[in-house]
Amino acid sequence: MRSFRRLMRQGIALQRAWVDAATYVPAVNRPPRSGERFAAGTHAYRSKGHRYKLYIPPAAAESGAPLLVMLHGCTQDPDTFATSTRMNALARERGLYVLYPAQSRKANAMGCWNWFQSRHQERGRGEPAMLASMTKAIVERYGIDRKRVFVAGFSAGGAMAAILAAAYPDLFAGAAIHSSPTVASLRGADRGVPTITFKGGAHVWSRKPDPTEALVRFFLGVK
C-alpha cells in the first residue's frame, strides 16, 4: 500500500509537469463559463454500454478543437483522475476536449485496463477496439480536429494508451505513457506516433527533440 501511494504521488507530480510545460494555470474554484460542462455519458459498443466523462470547454461551439483521451489507473475512475491531474483546468484555458473512459469493475475487479491479456492488445479486438470506437464517436459528435486526437494514461491506463497508439496510429496523433509496465510502454514506439514515457522522475521522448516544445505540440497541436 505504501509503495502504491508513493507511486501515485509521483504520478500526480509528474502529470502536473506535463501541464506546467504547456503554461498551466493552477486550478481554482471558478464558476463554469457558458457552454462548459463535465458530462457523464455512455457509449454503446457490441451491445454493451461503456461509461465515460467528457470535459467540454467553454468554446464548445467552435469546431476543430483538439481531443485528449485520458485513461485512468487501477482503482481510479474518471472523476478521481480528472481531479488528481487537474487536466480540466488546462483544458478550460486552452480549449481542449478531454475524454475520460471508465473501466468497468465487471471487466476488472480493480478497475484496471486489461492491457496484460492478449485479446486486449490488438487493433479490432477487446478494449482497444472499444476505446477507439468511443473516441471516434466523440470526434464525430463534437467536430473534433481529426489530426489533433491524443491519448494519455497512468499505470494500467498508460499501458493501454501505448497499445492504442500502436494499434491506431491513424486515430491518435500522439501518446503520453506514465508509470506503466515497461514492456507495454514501448508498444507505441517506432510506429510513427510521437510518444513520451514518464518513469520515476525522468521522461524520454520518441521522435521529438525538444521536450518542452514537443509537449505543447502534443497537447495543443501548436505549429
Image (spheres, helix red, strand yellow):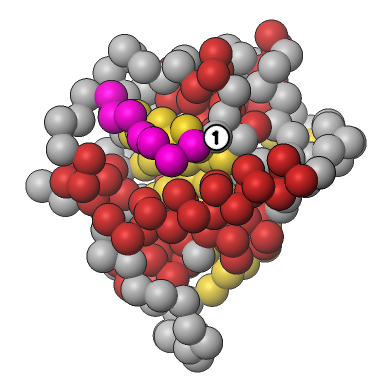
Quick check: can you spot residue 55? yes
Q: Residue furthest front?
A: 2
Q: Position of residue 132 (x, y in %)?
A: 53, 31
Number of numbered tags placed on the structure image: 1
- State the extent of the magenta-drawn residues as a range: 200-206
104 vs 36: above or below? above
Majority secondary structure in the magenta region: strand
Q: How packed is label 1: few (under 14 Cα within 10 Å), some, or many (20 or more)?
A: many
Quick check: can you spot residue 43? no
Q: Which residue is the site of mark 1? A: 179
Q: Position of residue 172 (x, y in %)?
A: 38, 32
Which image quarter holds the N terminus?
top right
Q: Position of residue 41 (x, y in %)?
A: 67, 57
Give the residue at x 73% y 14%: 117
On screen, residue 74 versus residue 194, left or right, reads right
On screen, residue 196 versus residue 160, left or right, reads left
Give the residue at x 46% y 76%: 27
Q: Determine which quarter of the picture holds residue 202.
A: top left
Give the residue at x 55% y 34%: 179
On screen, residue 149 versus residue 212, left or right, reads right
Disc 1 marks a residue whose amino acid type is: Ser
- Can residue 79 be found in the magenta stretch? no
Residue situated in front as seen by the camera: 60 or 25: 25
113 vs 12: above or below? above
Q: Determine which quarter of the picture holds residue 94.
A: bottom left
Q: Residue furthest top?
A: 118
- Can residue 203 be found in the magenta stretch? yes
Give the residue at x 50% y 22%: 185
Q: Determine whether the residue tagged by mark 1 lies in a helix, strand or loop.
A: loop
Q: Position of residue 85 (x, y in %)?
A: 53, 59
